[in-house]
Amino acid sequence: MAPPIATLSAAIGVPALILILTHLKSLPLAYTFRSWLLLRSLVKRATMAQLCPDPLFTVVSQDYRCLLDDIDYNQHMNNSTYNKMLDFSRIHLLYAVFPKMMMEPNHNIFGHNAGVLTLFKKEIAPFQQYTIQTRVWTWNQKWLWLQHRFVIPAEGDQTEPTVACVAVSKLVFKRASGKTVSPAEVLELCGHFVNNPTVEERRARNWETAANLLKLDTLFTDRDSWENTLCLSML
């Protein structure tokens, strides 16, 4: 005897619904749709503020939960997910701190991500809540660095949240012609006073660390040969 239609529908529909709900971030166009929703809210906020920027070192934050499509075979958040989520944090920061550059097309200046460095300290478990915090870190004549933290809320007997990961993003500003625009010029364009002694002290202090990170660019001119290669097809 064939099972009732309702029973058959439930047997197929319930698992399918659970699969969809637990993998929302990986559905077709999900990333694009989430980016659009974020941009829509940020543009509305910046317009209402008449493109007045938030303070230069303001911290923007976003709350998330680690879903099943975020985890790897080690049963914690996949390393690639960190970089994926940082896309939204950079967008948030740029529209909050640099609204004139982002929304006034006559300036013809665009911000580009030139690299990300992530350092892991504690895993983010499945279904665990976490917050990404982002702020301007430092800059020189060419590069603007952003600082990120993945923070797990305090639980149980904990009194302080746990920093699971820290990361930095290296940004560069360019015109459509390809000419580089200094971060100081962009900051002044957006209404920030970079000549403030307090601002300069913080920038210079953090640059002592960021300058060392630029040495990683020597990896592009590695002198050691790559000829001794073991090939493994993943197809």
Image (cartoon, helix red, strand yellow):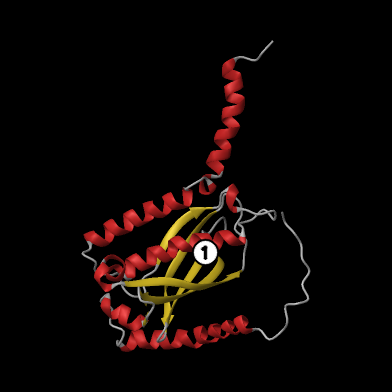
- What quarter of the picture does the C terminus occupy? bottom right
Of the pair 208 and 23, the residue shown nearer to us: 23
**Residue at the outermost top position:** 1
Number of numbered discs visible in the structure rendering: 1
Please name the residue shown 62% across and 68% down the image: 121
Of the pair 76 and 177, the residue shown nearer to us: 177
Of the pair 80 and 109, the residue shown nearer to us: 109
Residue 130 image offset from top left, x and y in percent: 51, 57
- What quarter of the picture does the N terminus occupy? top right
Q: Which residue position holds label 1?
A: 150
Q: In the rendered image, which quarter is residue 183 located in? A: bottom left
Is residue 71 shown above or below 111? above
Residue 36 image offset from top left, x and y in percent: 38, 53
Element under disc 1 = strand
Is residue 122 shown above or below 184? above
Please name the residue shown 45% across and 56% down the image: 63
Please name the residue shown 38% across and 55% down the image: 38
Residue 213 image offset from top left, x and y in percent: 55, 82
Residue 148 image offset from top left, x and y in percent: 48, 69
* Residue 4 in sight: yes
Question: Would residue 70 appear left or right of 35 to someone viewing this image?
Answer: right
Question: Would residue 142 appear left or right of 123 to someone viewing this image?
Answer: left
Is residue 171 shown above or below 202? above
* Residue 161 in sight: no
Of the pair 144 and 229, the residue shown nearer to us: 229
